[in-house]
Amino acid sequence: MRHRKKRLQLNRFTSWRKATIKSLTRNLLLYERIKTTLTKAKAAKVWVDKLISLAKDNGLSAKRQAFKILGDHKLVRLLFNEIANRFKEKTGGYTRILRLNRRRGDNAQMVILELTAIKKVEREKPKKERRLETKPPERKPEIPEEKPKEESKPEGPVVVKEKPTVVKKPTKHFLGGLRKIFKKERDSL
């Protein structure tokens, strides 16, 4: 009997499927929002929710289990220090799936998989607002610059010294070494 054995196979071998889900999980924790297909998002959502639940525990054993999945100490530190703190009061619902249009090539349902508590990032203001906020630059009083004195020209003939010509060595060509291997026909006798 196969009760409660459901898993999303993603039409891959076991090792390929695990690598795909691990990659999606790592990218979701790094960027907090990824665009993928619906079935991949459902598969990765389970792993991400488990990792965030582990991170809320914040013990050495939990960190080792998270490292076994993520494989990166910096990512484990990010998960336990920053991401888990955002979900302290929640008991579930750490991720959400937002549907997009279907992919043109194979008509697969595209989605955005994101964390529900995203770190707020200050975005740049539109150009119109920036122009209104900026003040015109203050004008500084102009100070007359001192002009360098002209040098007096010597009287008499001017002798111009010519630079000696430098003979450049020919550059080595890529096929230069091959010429030794493939000699001309007259050398083969």
Image (cartoon, rainbow, N blue to C red):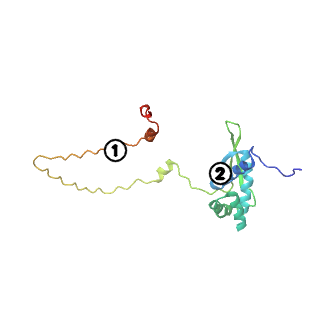
Residue at the far top in the pictured view:
185
Q: Work out whether 106 lies above or below 77.
A: above
Residue 29 falls in which quadrant of the image? bottom right
Where residue 114 sits in the image (x, y, percent)?
68, 52
Label 1: few (<14), some (14–19) or many (≥20) C-alpha neighbours in 10 Å? few
Instruction: Identify the disc placed on residue 28.
Output: none
Q: What is the secondary structure assignment of the residue under circle 1? A: loop
Q: Which residue is mark 1?
A: 169
Q: CA distance from mark 1 to mark 2?
A: 57 Å
Closer to the camera in the image, 56 or 123: 56
Residue type for callout 2: Arg
Where residue 111 sits in the image (x, y, percent)?
69, 45
Give me the residue at 73% from left, 48% from top. Answer: 17
Residue 67 falls in which quadrant of the image? bottom right
Q: Which residue is mark 2?
A: 33
**In the image, 10: left or right of 1?**
left
Give me the residue at 70% from left, 61% from top. Answer: 66
Closer to the camera in the image, 114 or 14: 14
